């Protein structure tokens, strides 16, 4: 009997394919292409400009009628995959990003297939999420009693830590009454090398940018502890409430690591919350040759770290750790009636959304969990040591190159340098001319697909910046960078009539 005529419910629609066999065939092709894509990444340019037609394809209107999945994938393969940001390439050293890994990509795929919501509950993904947080504690030497949460990245992880700091130090029930009810305005402290996400955090927390004092740094661009101490007593005298000091383990400009032990001691003496922005450097704690550089991080009240940087997890995943789990929960936990736990069953697990701002949370733990299981933590530690050694290697190459100069000695894996034909151009070039020349070198390195660097200003000097956070980089890539930078600089000098 054909009931579909009488019961239209039986022909309801779904997003599932009519024919799973077709999807399987196409998916196998996609996986084959993906393996080839990463295997051959070294052969492709690190970056290339998109042709106008590709660019225009992204302005097409909302699709109203269906297209076969194979066609949709064909479009992705033609218009998206050839034009990446480039951070999976061995010669991508811009800003500060991890270089991803295939296992992590499989983790993201399987997480999406399983579809679990990490807002909490009693299911395996929630245990994996908790285990990855526990592993982060273990990597940093945090006590097992600490709490933590996986978030989108370091910026959010810092916001989590700073929010707990604010609420704990406010002196009132801040959640109930808000910042306007505080008796004294809070003050936070960090160095003048602090990442810009802290400014956004202060703004979002309702404290305002001026509540974050930037303390001068020493010659190594580390926070000046005496200047910090002076600022704190000045603020106390002026009626402010010093609340939190933010130490940076690896600044974004040069990789400088604040003296975390001294900061921990000072925070203890001054009764401040001690937060560490360890987005770059917290994970150095697992690197056998360099772990000593972040000694003291285990004393922090909260730490932000970034598995999508030095664990090379595909974006996005950051992690906030908080020593006092009760303070952490107290800052975020809200249990509306529709999210009450039950004694048994699916809702009997812990609500993970009680540790942050999101309700629905993705299964971002799986990509980290799988890669750590596959390689073991020691491999990741060695890769961090390797990048730091590569930073030293590049610094030596630059020192030996007649047309290049180091602008700051690398603290870890970030190298700041510039093309400077001083010796051969009598009188030298002005700062502005040098900046133009170096910016042009940087752009040509990108446009010719050779290498992606970024630039910054250190000690008032404009420079090119190489951040080697990349498990694919080899020393020969750094040799090539030094050769090509000098070639481009010479070519431009010749065009400009100079001879170097
Ligand atoms: C990258 C970085 C951040 C921000 O982390 P995201 O993962 O990009 O949000 C914060 N602080 C420092 C020192 C960083 O290097």
Image (spheres, rainbow, N blue to C red):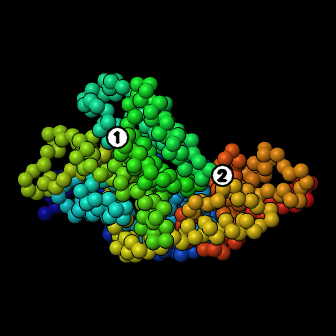
At x 40% / y 56%, what residue is drawn?
A: 297
Residue 398 sits in quarter: bottom right
Task: Residue 45: tell me if it is visible.
Answer: no
Residue 91 sits in quarter: bottom right
Q: Between tags 2 and 1, which lies in front?
A: 1
Q: Within 8 Å: ligand 1 and the Cβ of disc 2?
A: no
x, y (%) of residue 133? Answer: 31, 59
At x 17% / y 44%, what residue is drawn?
A: 339
Residue 17 in the figure: left or right of residue 202:
left
x, y (%) of residue 329? Answer: 24, 45
The residue at which mark 2 appears reads as: 455
Distance of label 2 from label 1 (alpha carbons): 38 Å
Task: Residue 348: tell me if it is visible.
Answer: yes
At x 49% / y 35%, what residue is drawn?
A: 231
The residue at which mark 1 appears reads as: 271
Secondary structure at badge 2 equals: strand
Does 491 appear above or below 322?
below
At x 26% / y 49%, what residue is drawn?
A: 324
x, y (%) of residue 349? Answer: 16, 55
């Amino acid at each position: 009997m054909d009931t579909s005529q009488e019961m239209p419910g039986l022909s309801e629609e779904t997003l599932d394919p009519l024919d799973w066999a077709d999807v399987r065939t196409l998916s196998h092709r996609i996986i084959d292409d993906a393996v080839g894509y990463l295997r051959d990444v070294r052969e492709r340019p690190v970056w290339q400009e998109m042709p106008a037609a590709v660019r225009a394809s992204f302005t097409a209107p909302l699709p109203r009628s269906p297209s076969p999945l194979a066609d949709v994938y064909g479009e992705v393969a033609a218009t998206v995959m050839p034009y990446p940001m480039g951070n999976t390439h061995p010669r991508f050293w811009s800003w500060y990003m991890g270089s991803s890994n295939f296992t992590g990509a499989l983790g993201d795929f399987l997480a999406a297939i399983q579809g679990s919501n990490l807002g909490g509950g009693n299911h395996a993904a929630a245990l994996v999420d908790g285990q990855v947080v526990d592993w982060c504690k273990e990597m940093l030497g945090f006590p097992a009693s600490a709490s933590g949460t996986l978030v989108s990245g370091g910026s959010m992880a810092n916001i989590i830590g700073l929010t707990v700091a604010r609420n704990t130090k406010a002196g009132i029930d801040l959640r109930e009454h808000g910042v306007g009810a505080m008796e004294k305005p809070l003050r936070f402290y960090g160095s003048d090398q602090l990442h810009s996400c802290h400014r956004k955090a202060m703004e979002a927390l309702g404290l305002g940018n001026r509540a974050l004092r930037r303390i001068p740094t020493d010659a190594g661009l580390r926070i000046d502890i005496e200047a910090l101490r002076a600022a704190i007593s000045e603020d106390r005298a002026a009626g402010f409430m010093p609340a939190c000091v933010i130490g940076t383990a690896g600044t974004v400009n040069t990789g400088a690591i604040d003296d975390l032990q001294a900061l921990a001691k000072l925070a203890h003496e001054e009764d401040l919350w001690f937060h560490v922005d360890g987005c770059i450097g917290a994970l150095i704690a697992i690197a056998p040759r360099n772990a000593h550089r972040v000694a003291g991080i285990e004393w922090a009240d909260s730490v932000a770290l970034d598995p999508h940087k030095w664990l090379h997890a595909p974006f996005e995943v950051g992690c906030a750790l908080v020593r006092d789990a009760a303070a952490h929960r107290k800052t975020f936990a809200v249990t509306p009636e529709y999210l009450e736990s039950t004694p048994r069953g699916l809702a009997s697990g812990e609500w993970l959304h009680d540790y942050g701002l999101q309700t629905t949370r993705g299964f971002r733990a799986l990509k980290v969990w799988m890669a750590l299981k596959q390689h073991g933590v020691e491999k990741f530690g060695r890769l961090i040591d390797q990048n730091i050694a590569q930073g030293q290697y590049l610094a030596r190459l630059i020192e030996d190159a007649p047309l290049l100069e180091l602008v700051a000695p690398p603290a870890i894996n970030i190298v700041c340098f510039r093309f400077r034909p001083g010796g051969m151009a009598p009188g030298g070039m002005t700062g502005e001319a040098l900046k133009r020349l170096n910016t042009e070198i940087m752009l040509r390195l990108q446009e010719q697909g050779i290498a992606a660097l970024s630039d910054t200003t250190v000690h008032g000097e404009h420079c090119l910046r190489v951040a080697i956070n990349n498990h694919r980089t080899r020393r020969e890539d750094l040799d090539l960078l030094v050769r090509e930078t000098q070639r481009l600089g010479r070519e431009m000098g010749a065009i400009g009539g100079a001879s170097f």
